[in-house]
Image (cartoon, rainbow, N blue to C red):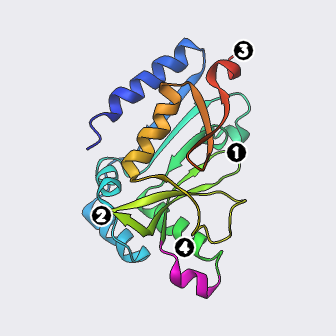
Amino acid sequence: MFEWLPGVLREASSLAASLHIEWVSSFAEPATKDDLLACEDAVSEPLSPSHRAFLQTYNGASLALKLPDAPGGVPWATYGVQIFSTREIILETAEVAELFDAEVRGRNRFLTIARYGREGDRCLADYNRVQGGEAAIVDAFHEVPDDWSSSPIIAQSFEDWLRRLLDGFVSRQEIFWYWMPGDLTVEATIAELST
């Protein structure tokens, strides 16, 4: 399912090098069957097919541009995304659930899949909006409604989300910050940051 990913990552690295910016990507070893089952059990949701396929290949990842202003030397903290491992999904999903009162928690079925840099916004799989077995992906932007149930869908699946994220970088040389209705909010192009 993610056969396309290595080629896109090579393009991203080559593009960044041509602009004298370091592209940093790291991918964890595959999740075990026990990792996947423990995750699903803890969050009380089955992983959607494309998310499960990613975790079976890479149990977490970080994708970032390494820029001089990265706080604490953590590359993804400024311009990038941390895609959560099964263990991180459990912890982050529990943390998001604690933001809601019991009534809201009972009706929302979110699984936290990633965190963006800058504001630290999370990206969620919304299990109230499932199509073809795939949970819709929404941005948990800190300034939209507090339960995110009305957040616009930003991708139809985990794979669609990852493709769109990398396409903005490779095809349009955009630096992603967070998602807004219909598209990424672009903070700057790579060329602007490299001058």
Question: Closer to the N terminus: mark 1 or mark 3?
Answer: 1
Please tell me whether residue 111 is drawn above or below residue 82 in the rendered image.
Answer: below
Q: Which mark is residue 133?
A: 2
Disc 4 marks which residue?
94
Q: Secondary structure at mark 3?
A: loop
For badge 1, the amino acid type reads Arg
Q: Which mark is residue 195?
A: 3
Foreground residue, 192 or 94? 192
Question: Quick check: is 90 in the magenta stretch?
Answer: no
Q: Secondary structure at mark 1?
A: loop
Question: Closer to the N terminus: mark 1 or mark 2?
Answer: 1
Q: For mark 4, does the 10 Å Cα neighbourhood hold few (<14), some (14 to 19), or many (20 or more) residues?
A: some
Q: CA distance from mark 3 to mark 2?
A: 44 Å
Quarter that holds the C terminus: top right
Q: Which residues are magenta?
A: 101-109
Q: For mark 1, does the 10 Å Cα neighbourhood hold few (<14), some (14 to 19), or many (20 or more) residues?
A: some
Question: Closer to the N terminus: mark 3 or mark 2?
Answer: 2
Residue at 53% from the left image edge and 58% from the top image edge: 138
Residue at 53% from the left image edge and 16% from the top image edge: 17
Disc 1 marks which residue?
118
For badge 4, the amino acid type reads Ala
Quarter that holds the N terminus: top left
Q: Secondary structure at mark 4?
A: helix
Q: For mark 3, does the 10 Å Cα neighbourhood hold few (<14), some (14 to 19), or many (20 or more) residues?
A: few
Of tags 4 and 3, the one toward the viewer is 3
Residue at 55% from the left image edge and 65% from the top image edge: 92
Q: Residue furthest top?
A: 18
Residues at marks 1 and 3 touching, judged by CB atoms closer than 8 Å:
no
Residue at 57% from the left image edge and 69% from the top image edge: 149
Q: CA distance from mark 4 to mark 3?
A: 41 Å
Q: Position of residue 122 (x, y in %)?
A: 59, 57
